[in-house]
Image (spheres, rainbow, N blue to C red):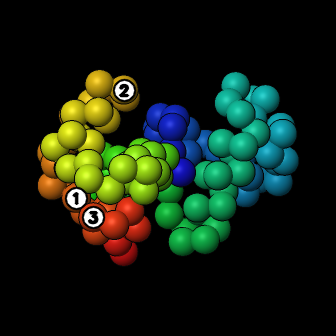
């Protein structure tokens, strides 16, 4: 699953790295800067892994349908193989509020209730 929080500022990441290089623990840094300890750990893991603290933007567009939505579509098709993609798209829109094109729904099943990869 993807990130849910906000990105920390460049200045905050610089502070975390500089304090860590001075020998401070993650707990001390988190307390000083009023952030979560896991945030300090994430910043340091990225810094030590690639020696970078700058923000790298997300690549590509996020998926419209999550795995849960896809499984729901497949269950419905297995239950009633005569359902068509426009019906499934309309049902998905009414239940979850996600307006998707029937072609998007078609990508996830081959008409027999099995998922296409």
Task: Give the mark, 1 or 3, whose residue is nearer the N terminus.
Answer: 1
- Which residue of the protein is positioned furthest toward the bottom in this rendering? 117
Q: Which residue occupies the foreground of this view, 99 or 82?
A: 82
Task: Give the mark, 1 or 2, whose residue is nearer the N terminus.
Answer: 2
Mark 2 touching mark 3, by CB under 8 A?
no
On the image, the x and y values in percent for residue 1 come to 53, 51
On the image, the x and y values in percent for residue 86 come to 16, 43
Q: Which residue occupies the foreground of this view, 28 or 87?
A: 87
Residue highlighted by disc 2: 95
Spatial separation of the CA atoms under disc 1 and disc 2: 18 Å
On the image, the x and y values in percent for residue 59 come to 30, 60
State the quadrant of the C terminus.
bottom left
Residue highlighted by disc 1: 106
Question: What is the secondary structure assignment of the residue under circle 1?
Answer: helix
Spatial separation of the CA atoms under disc 2 and disc 3: 21 Å
On the image, the x and y values in percent for residue 85 come to 20, 49
Q: Nearer the viewer, mark 1 or mark 3?
A: 3
**Residue drawn at (22%, 58%), measured in percent from left and top?**
106
């Amino acid at each position: 699953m993807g990130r849910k929080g906000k990105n920390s500022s460049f200045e905050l990441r610089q502070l975390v790295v500089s304090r860590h290089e001075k020998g401070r623990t993650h707990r001390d840094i988190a307390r000083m800067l009023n952030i979560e300890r896991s945030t300090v750990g994430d910043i340091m893991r990225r810094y030590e892994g690639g020696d970078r603290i700058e923000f790298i933007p997300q690549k590509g567009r996020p998926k419209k349908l999550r795995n849960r939505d896809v499984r729901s579509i497949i269950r419905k098709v297995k239950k009633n193989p005569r359902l068509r993609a426009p019906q499934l798209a309309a049902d998905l829109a009414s239940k979850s509020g996600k307006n998707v094109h029937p072609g998007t729904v078609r990508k996830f099943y081959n008409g027999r209730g099995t998922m296409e990869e």
